[in-house]
Amino acid sequence: IGICVLLLILKKTRTTGIVCSCSLAVTFLINNIILKNIIARTRPYEVVEGLNRIIGAQSDFSFPSGHSGASFAVAVEMPKKYGVPALIVATLIAFSRLYVGVHYPFDVIAGVLTGTIYAVITVAIYRKFFKDKKHSEK
């Protein structure tokens, strides 16, 4: 969210900020509001004997990982100059969800895949309706 706000503030990156914000919003809506509540998978620390979580109990369901989806939804949208560092940070965020004990591996993989897919679709829709050649050449 912070990266999206920063991109929106700077005139040079405003278009990227708009696309990143849309991708983030779509990811949140589909993953966190729809899929988590339909699938309703319990968190691993609730069912795996001896698994201790490092962070507080989560208030929603486990599948898919919202943090992984959101981080990849934004990282995939980043310009080439920042794309690799953003993908590294997104990967670390995804692994952190396993480390802190709040997701199963498949939750994280699903979050990564859905975030990436939503980002690609968001860019395609943006290009179609706004024909922004600068953003499409990332």
Image (cartoon, rainbow, N blue to C red):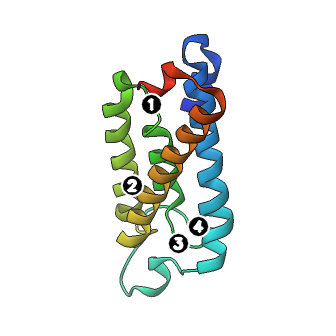
Residue 116 visible to an observer of this rendering: yes
Residue that carries the numbered disc 2 in the rendered image: 94
Q: Which of 78 and 45 is in front in this view?
A: 78
Q: Which amino acid does label 2 sit on?
A: Ala
**Residue at the extreme top:** 11
- Residue at 41 percent across and 68 percent down: it is 101
Residue that carries the numbered disc 4 in the rendered image: 58
Kindly indicate the quadrant of the structure image that contains residue 98: bottom left
Residue 9 screen position, x and y as percent:
64, 18
From the viewer's perspective, is the residue at label 4 or at label 1 nearer? 1
Q: Earlier in the sequence, mark 1 or mark 3?
A: 3
Q: Which mark is residue 62?
A: 3
Q: How crowded is mark 2: few (under 14 residues within 10 Å), some or many (20 or more)?
A: many
Left or right: 10 with respect to 43?
Answer: right
Q: Earlier in the sequence, mark 3 or mark 2?
A: 3
1 and 3 marks in contact (CB < 8 Å): no
Residue that carries the numbered disc 1 in the rendered image: 78
Query: In which quadrant will I find the N terminus?
Result: top right
3 and 4 marks in contact (CB < 8 Å): yes
Measured Cα–Cα span from mark 4 to mark 1:
29 Å
Q: Earlier in the sequence, mark 4 or mark 2?
A: 4
